[in-house]
Image (cartoon, helix red, strand yellow):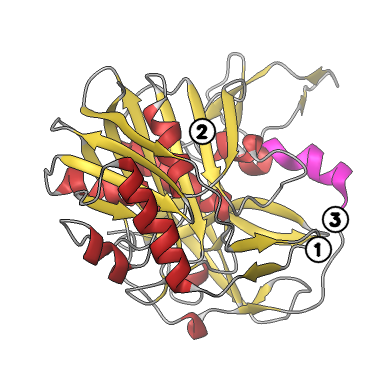
């Protein structure tokens, strides 16, 4: 039986109180990193990562390198990318080993939750698992989604039939369905913000925050997974800013710059791993890490990588109004002086804050999708002012 030490939640700022949507600079991986870093705010050791979603950006490749870099985790850690919805996430949680970070991510509606298992904490155990076939939503080879369009069938032969078969006809909380159905079928109406892979973990966070014990059920079409949640000590970290209208966000032009994968590969670690180089016998940090040439023209390559702080103060700022192909315009650039290391980093300002950041403002560096080139997400860091994730 796994125990949960901490839970981290993340909602994008765009959308309404009932339905959040991602920004131009966000995708499933940036959402997963935000939730994962929130869960790790209290510390803790991670031995493996499980990522569950139906919206992963690279389905023909791996998203593990970006995910681990954004979480400041060892690139040698095991990462399992799991295709699934709400039941798949609870299945991953109930079978997880200690020191596993499980992350559920959704894009419609948008949100992400991460939980870190440990030897002690909030206890959960499997008490129901039903696999039935009712494919009311399908995707063809071209990627187009088709909905069967019979909500009554989905409700009666999907949700209600699965609950009856599982002997959990009145669970404490139901995830994976809209708020109206969840409120009718569960003891507690939690008004969960998502209905996909993250919804079960949002339900778990709600039960932990309210100190509730009982049965948590996650459903998807005809399938169901349920866990019994006991009492225990767990920390819930929420990064859920107030919603803003999507119309306020700068929009990228239809033009696109093609990617050079050779250049992408060379710059990957420098852009995505927030580290500086330090040479033997020197306290000076080089960011990004790079070789040096001594006075006698000897090439020095013996630097070690040092993690950089992800908080700092704006040293200077500029807002660019000239359109750039494939990038939202206008956009702001800031030179951020990182705390306590004597390093200044030039980064973009996160989408909601373009033109609103000034010299002296404090904030944190967050992983964002800076561009989408030839179908490849190009990640890097942006500056987010203090107070927006409260």
Q: Which residue position is annotated with label 3?
A: 259
Disc 2 secondary structure class: strand
Q: With 191 as the anchor, is 214 left or right in this view? A: left
Question: Residue 226 in the image: x percent, y percent?
Answer: 33, 40
Q: With 6 as the anchor, is 336 left or right in this view? A: right
Magenta range is 259-269
Quadrant (top left, top right, bottom left, bottom right) of the C terminus = bottom left
For the point 32% across and 28% down, the residue is 43
The residues tagged by marks 2 and 3 sit, at their Cα atoms, a distance apart of 29 Å
For disc 2, the neighbor class at 10 Å (few under 14, some 14 to 19, many from 20) is: many
Relative vertical location of residue 302 with respect to residue 373 in this rendering, above or below = above
The residues tagged by marks 1 and 3 sit, at their Cα atoms, a distance apart of 23 Å
For the point 66% across and 41% down, the residue is 63
Question: Residue 177 in the image: x percent, y percent?
Answer: 38, 62
Is residue 18 inside the magenta stretch?
Answer: no
Mark 2 or mark 3: name the one nearer the start of the chain: 2
Question: Residue 60 in the image: x percent, y percent?
Answer: 77, 44
For the point 45% across and 33% down, the residue is 92
- Which-is-in-front pick, marks 2 and 3? 2
Disc 3 secondary structure class: loop
């Amino acid at each position: 039986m796994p125990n949960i030490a901490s839970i981290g939640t993340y909602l994008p700022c765009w959308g309404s109180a009932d339905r959040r949507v991602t920004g131009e600079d966000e995708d499933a991986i940036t959402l997963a990193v935000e939730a994962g870093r929130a869960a790790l705010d209290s510390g803790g050791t991670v031995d493996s990562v499980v990522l569950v979603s139906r919206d992963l950006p690279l389905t023909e490749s791996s998203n593990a390198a970006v995910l681990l870099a954004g979480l400041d985790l060892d690139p040698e850690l095991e990462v399992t990318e799991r295709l699934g919805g709400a039941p798949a996430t609870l299945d991953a949680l109930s079978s997880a080993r200690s020191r596993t970070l499980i992350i559920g991510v959704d894009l419609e509606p948008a949100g992400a939750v991460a939980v870190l298992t440990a030897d002690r904490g909030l206890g959960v155990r499997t008490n129901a698992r039903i696999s039935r076939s009712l494919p009311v939503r399908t995707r063809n080879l071209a990627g187009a989604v088709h909905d069967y369009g019979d909500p009554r069938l989905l409700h009666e032969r999907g949700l209600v039939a699965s609950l009856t078969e599982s002997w959990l006809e009145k669970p404490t909380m139901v995830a994976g369905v809209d708020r109206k159905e969840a409120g009718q079928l569960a003891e507690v109406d939690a008004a969960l913000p998502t209905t996909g892979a993250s919804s079960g973990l949002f339900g778990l966070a709600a039960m932990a925050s309210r100190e509730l014990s009982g049965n948590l059920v996650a459903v998807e079409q005809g399938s169901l997974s349920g866990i019994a949640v006991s009492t225990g000590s767990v920390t819930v970290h929420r990064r859920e800013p107030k919603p803003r209208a999507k119309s306020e966000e700068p929009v990228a032009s239809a033009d696109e710059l093609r990617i050079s994968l050779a250049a992408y590969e060379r710059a990957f670690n420098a852009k995505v791993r927030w580290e500086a180089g330090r040479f033997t016998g020197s306290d000076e940090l080089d960011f990004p890490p790079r070789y040096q040439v001594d006075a006698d023209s000897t090439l020095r390559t013996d630097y070690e990588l040092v993690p950089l702080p992800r908080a700092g103060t704006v040293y200077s700022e500029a807002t660019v109004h000239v359109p750039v192909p494939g990038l939202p315009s206008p956009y702001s650039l800031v030179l951020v002086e990182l705390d306590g290391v004597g390093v200044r980093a030039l980064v973009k300002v996160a989408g909601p804050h373009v033109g609103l950041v000034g010299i002296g403002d404090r904030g944190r560096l967050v992983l964002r999708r800076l561009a989408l080139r030839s179908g490849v997400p190009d990640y890097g860091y942006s500056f987010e002012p203090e107070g927006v994730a409260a």
